Image (cartoon, rainbow, N blue to C red):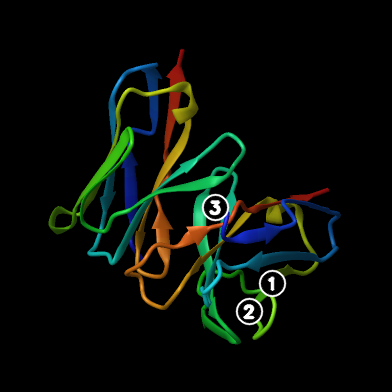
Amino acid sequence: GIQVEQSPPDLILQEGANSTLRCNFSDSVNNLQWFHQNPWGQLINLFYIPSGTKQNGRLSATTVATERYSLLYISSSQTTDSGVYFCAAGDYKLSFGAGTTVTVRA
Amino acid sequence: NAGVMQNPRHLVRRRGQEARLRCSPMKGHSHVYWYRQLPEEGLKFMVYLQKENIIDESGMPKERFSAEFPKEGPSILRIQQVVRGDSAAYFCASSPRTGGDQPQHFGDGTRLSIL
């Protein structure tokens, strides 16, 4: 199956800072999604982005399919951005990375 | 996450009992996927179902686990004779059609605890 690697594993930010999370995947994919798992365990769907660039408020994502990586940008971070960010790639069978744990300090 | 409904949110079972987890997909979705999030192991695919058909169960443990998605009603993930190692969060997702070229929409999960 698809191997998905995320970096960095942990990220500590001061409120208001910007950050970039990276996801590498081992093969071409039809589906790539970014999720935020909040402290209550809910998986919040951030982006469906098998290629190209999308933006949603302070979040944006870019996937370069030919080079098999995706980036998630968080701008002007807030404490509510804390949690674990997962990248998942594949087709109907999604392989998840190990996640990046983001802690935003006030 | 409003569209995919999972229940119960939390389920506690004693070793040897059965656990039934339910998933109602988003309206208009006929494809359901189950994933399991074990502590320290991350999220793993378990099974992909369409109405009345199991399409891919390559991620299901060989024993005690089964899944169904009947013509009417929710998808059910059933775990027989639960053991401590079954404690995990179980997530269901749905999509409107087959293939990977569309997003999967996830429910809030069921947290299963085994005493």
In the rendered image, residues at marks 2 and 3 fall on the same chain? yes
Which mark, residue B69?
Answer: 2
Q: Quadrant of residue A14?
A: top left
CA gap between label 2 and label 1 equals: 6 Å
**Label 2 secondary element:** loop
- In the rendered image, residue B14, in percent from the top left (x then y), is placed at 86, 54
Query: Where does label 3 land, which residue?
Result: B1
**Label 1 secondary element:** strand
Q: Earlier in the sequence, mark 1 or mark 3?
A: 3
Q: What chain letter is assigned to the residue under label 1?
A: B
Query: Where does label 1 land, which residue?
Result: B76
Amino acid carrying label 1: it is: Ile
Residue A71 shows in the view: no
Q: Is residue A5 above or below residue A1?
A: above
**Label 3 secondary element:** loop
**Residue at horizontal 40 percent and vertical 70 percent from the top:** A92
Q: Earlier in the sequence, mark 2 or mark 3?
A: 3
**Residue at horizontal 21 percent and vertical 57 percent from the top:** A51
**Residue at horizontal 42 percent and vertical 77 percent from the top:** B97
Amino acid carrying label 2: it is: Phe
CA gap between label 1 and label 3 equals: 19 Å
Q: Is residue B114 left or right of residue A66?
A: right
Q: Earlier in the sequence, mark 2 or mark 1?
A: 2
Amino acid carrying label 3: it is: Asn
**Residue at horizontal 64 percent and vertical 68 percent from the top:** B24
Do labels 2 and 1 touch, CB within 8 Å? Answer: yes
Please state which of residues B30 and A38 is positioned toward the viewer in this rendering: B30
